[in-house]
Every structure is written in C-alpha cells, then in structure tokens.
Amino acid sequence: MESDTTAALYKAPRTDVTQDQGKFRIHLNFPGRNHPDHADHGYGPLATVVESFMDPDTLISMHQHRNEEIISWVPAGVMRHDDRQGNELVTDADHLMVMGAGSGFWHEERTLADDPPLRMLQIFVRPHSLGLEPTIQHEPIPAPVDGEWRHLFGPAGSDAPLTVRNAVDCYDVELAAGDSVELPARKGWDTYFYVFDGAVTADGTEFGKTESGLRVGDGTTTITADVDSQLVAFVIDPDAPVTRQGTVGR
C-alpha cells in the first residue's frame, strides 16, 4: 500500500463488531475501516485494537497464538497471564505486556474473584515475518504525566520500554478538560487514535468515548479534551512489509 500524500482525518464510530462470551466480551476496532478507500481491515502493521472486558473470576483457558504481536494495555485493574514457559505475570496500570507469538505461544488469562471488573485494550500488530521466535516482554512503564504522550512500545531501536517486530509506535495520554496536545506524528507515517475515555475535538471534529480517528498524510493535528479524557495513539508506517496469518489479527 502506498502512503496517501493528501492530509486527511477520518473518523469511525464505536465498532459494531463484537463477541459476547458471557464473562468475557470484546469489541473489535479495525483501523483500516476508518479510511473510505482502504480495502484492508487493518492499517499497515496495525491489525486490530480490541476493547476487552473480563468480569471477576473469569478464566480464558490455555490457547495458542501464532504470527502476531499481542500487546496488553491495562489502564486500571489487573489481567493475570500464565503460559507454558512457566511465566505467571500480572499486567496492570504500571506494567505493559508484549507477547510475540511467532511460531506459536500458548497462554491463558484470568481474573480472580476479588479482582475488579476489567476493561483493557489488546492490540494486535502484524509482524514483518512469519515463524519468528516466540517471545514475552513484561516491563514496568513510566508513570503518566498529565498532558504528555507516554511512549509505550515501538520497533527495535526506539526509546520505548517494549518493542514489537514491525513499524508501529504506541503512545497514551491523559488530558484534563480544556487541555490540548498535538497528535504524535512522523514524516511519511500515519496516525490512528482511539478515545478510551472521555471526549475530544481534533481539528474541529468531535470524537466521543470508543470512537477513533485516522490521520493520513504529513502535518499536525491538535487534540483538545472536551472533558477529562484518555487516549491511545499509534504512529504507523503504512508501507511496512506485513504478514497476514495471525491467529486473531491477520
């Protein structure tokens, strides 16, 4: 796919693609669908951004992923991960997890009966190659600073605390009502953002909770919080080589 040279901002409403498994529910956001002339449901290396809900005392039993990078972003509450490599990890607001499934990675997720209800994002990145070595990263992340983008993950060589095996950088930000910030950008790359909480205005367009935007082309976009808000943004190389054989993201 060639990068669009005309700057534009495309909005998508809350996704209508959902799965309800009772105590586990997901809403699948496909960044490529923001763009009216884009045939791929993903956008370059970013396959999908999944809003996930887990009630207390929920188990998603051991299952395998292949050929996708799965990032667990938990702004509040806890997500508990066990795997066949013997890892027992807790991801929360102070930690981020990147599971590079590669040629195959088995894991399970759970919440305990006394854990709070969980709402999180599970982000699926298409790797640049098939059959990579399976990896797991679970690292502390810097404390958020109000009004400043926090770099969460990026490709190897970036200054992010965790890495993915393709050309995507991820940031989050907490904005107080009335505060403004420029959307992260990089020349030749495009930016997709998701409003996890609150409501914002970007270049005159309003975005509510669970709505998303895709900024295509070079230039700047200013985001202003209409109420206290929390956003996640992905700066994407639309021309990066990608694979499309992931278990979920594809």
Image: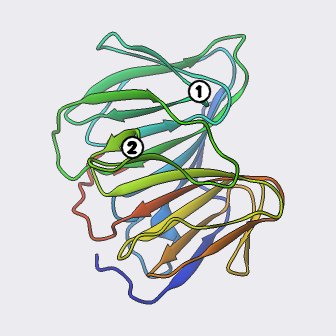
Residue type indicated by callout 1: Asp
Please, is residue 7 above or below residue 56 in the view?
below
Q: Residues within 10 Å of mark 1 (few under 14, many from 20)?
A: some
For marks 1 and 2, the one nearer the N-term is 1
User: In the rendered view, does 95 fall on the left or right side of 40?
Assistant: right
Q: Nearer the viewer, residue 152 or 17?
A: 152
What residue is disc 1 on?
92
Residue type indicated by callout 2: Val
Residue 7 point in image, percent of width and height: 49, 86
Residue 25 point in image, percent of width and height: 62, 36
What is the distance, in whole Å, between disc 1 and disc 2 at their CAs? 23 Å
Please, is residue 111 above or below residue 73 in the view?
above
Asked which colour scheme the image uses, the reply is rainbow
- Residue at left 49%, top 63%? 31
User: In the rendered view, does 170 fall on the left or right side of 158?
Assistant: right
Q: Nearer the viewer, residue 156 or 26?
A: 156
Quick one: SS at disc 2?
A: loop
What residue is disc 2 on?
248
